[in-house]
Image (cartoon, rainbow, N blue to C red):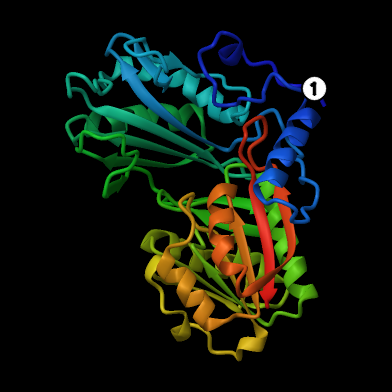
């Protein structure tokens, strides 16, 4: 497989995909070598490649800058004082995301939605997030605003967009008045009739809302979730506790093969939608609860005997909190599965966990083709 042609990379305007000028297989080999060095002599399976390369990314987080006459939607320039860069047809974004992005600058100008000026601390629109569901192609469009001043004009933009793109099902305005690079504010206003989009991975439907975490590469995510369900069956696990569950994918896939599953997540909106997904998928053996996983008392959520239980953790890039790590060690689940988008913090956490757990398998997934990043699945049993 050859590399993707990217004008932004070739022009030096974007360096997010540092491996995009390499043959894809060469990039995988480079990432695998770095992973081997990080985990010393640990046996690691070959990287599971991405079935889709062009347009694999189903979520775009874009900075809005420029002026009212010339809005810029893309990324800040790495050169100090330089103009930000429009990224309106990124080759790794899903095509529908790019189509919508290309229409937005003219609409922002038409309805006088001023970009936020970081230096002057003036303007309204700070960020745009576009999420496209897999197979259904439903789209969620999120605007991050400094205030509610432009809300009525933004609603008019939405009417134009939905008329042209009926796949847009959810539109929100997140109010973020703080002068910091925080993508979403505490107040999220739903401006559409629908509150969530539905994504299909295999035979499982995920319900995704404005505050739901989901993997940005659904073609690889489906392989990851399927692999975990298969491993749980092989290990004869009866109950799964899914921490930092997001949309609930790990637990929904496990429940679909007969494993009683329970998911925990701090976002109340994500939990509400995950429980909706349980009903949509016709499952009776899966439930979700609001919990701060960083501060969780695991002894309160495991009704079955410890010999039948597995815990899966999929924490943010910062990795596990020291508190949760200690709680896992105290609870001693016989199977511990760690899915990480940051191998460095996984390696750090394994230094402690390996005193109590034996690594059975380590499987990397190329969730982020053409970048240095990987999703790494680590399956452990009590030592």
Nearest the eye: 293 or 27: 27
Residue 55 in the image: state x and y as whole percent.
Answer: 65, 30
Residue 88 in the image: state x and y as whole percent.
Answer: 51, 19
Whether residue 293 is visible, yes or no, is no
Q: Which residue is at 62% across, 32% downward?
A: 371
**Image position of 306 (left or right of 296):** right
Position of 247 relative to 9 (above/below): below
Whether residue 41 is visible, yes or no, is yes
Quadrant location, the C terminus: bottom right
Q: Which residue is at 67% across, 57% downward?
A: 377
Nearest the eye: 205 or 293: 293
Return the residue at label 1.
2
Q: Which residue is at 56% across, 14% downward?
A: 8
Q: Secondary structure at mark 1?
A: loop
Residue 235 in the image: state x and y as whole percent.
Answer: 76, 76
Q: Which residue is at 49% across, 56% downward?
A: 319
Nearest the eye: 168 or 368: 368
Quadrant location, the N terminus: top right
Position of 32 relative to 198 (above/below): above
Q: Quadrant of residue 84?
A: top left
């Amino acid at each position: 497989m050859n590399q993707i042609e990217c004008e932004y990379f070739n022009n030096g305007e974007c360096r997010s995909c540092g491996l995009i000028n390499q043959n894809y297989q060469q990039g995988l080999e480079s990432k695998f070598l770095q992973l081997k060095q990080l985990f010393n002599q640990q046996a690691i399976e070959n990287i599971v490649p991405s079935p889709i390369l062009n347009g694999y990314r189903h979520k775009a987080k874009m900075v809005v800058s420029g002026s009212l006459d010339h809005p810029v939607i893309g990324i800040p320039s790495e050169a100090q004082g330089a103009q930000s860069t429009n990224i309106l047809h990124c080759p790794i974004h899903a095509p529908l995301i790019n189509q919508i992005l290309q229409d937005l600058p003219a609409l922002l100008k038409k309805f006088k939605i001023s970009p936020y000026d970081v230096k002057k601390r003036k303007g309204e629109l700070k960020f745009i997030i576009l999420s496209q569901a897999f197979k259904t192609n439903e789209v969620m469009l999120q605007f991050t605003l400094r205030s509610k001043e432009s809300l009525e004009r933004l609603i008019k933009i939405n009417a134009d967009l939905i008329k042209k793109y009926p796949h847009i099902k959810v539109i929100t305005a997140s109010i973020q008045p703080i002068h910091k690079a925080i993508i979403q504010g505490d107040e999220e206003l739903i401006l559409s009739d629908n509150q969530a989009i539905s994504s299909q991975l295999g035979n499982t439907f995920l319900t995704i809302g404005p505050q739901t975490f989901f993997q940005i590469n659904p073609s690889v995510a489906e392989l990851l979730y399927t692999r975990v369900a298969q491993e749980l069956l092989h290990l004869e696990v009866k109950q799964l506790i899914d921490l930092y569950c997001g949309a609930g994918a790990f637990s929904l896939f496990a429940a679909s093969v007969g494993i009683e599953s329970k998911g925990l997540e701090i976002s109340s909106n994500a939990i509400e939608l995950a429980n909706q997904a349980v009903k949509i998928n016709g499952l009776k053996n899966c439930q979700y609860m609001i919990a701060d996983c960083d501060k969780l008392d695991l002894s309160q959520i495991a009704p079955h005997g410890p010999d039948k239980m597995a815990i899966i953790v999929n924490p943010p890039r910062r990795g596990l909190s020291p508190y949760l790590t200690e709680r896992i060690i105290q609870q001693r689940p016989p199977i511990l599965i760690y899915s990480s988008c940051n191998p460095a913090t996984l390696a750090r956490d394994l230094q402690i966990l390996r005193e109590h757990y034996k690594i059975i398998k380590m499987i990397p997934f190329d969730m982020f083709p053409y970048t240095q990043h990987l999703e790494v699945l680590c399956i452990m049993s009590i030592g």
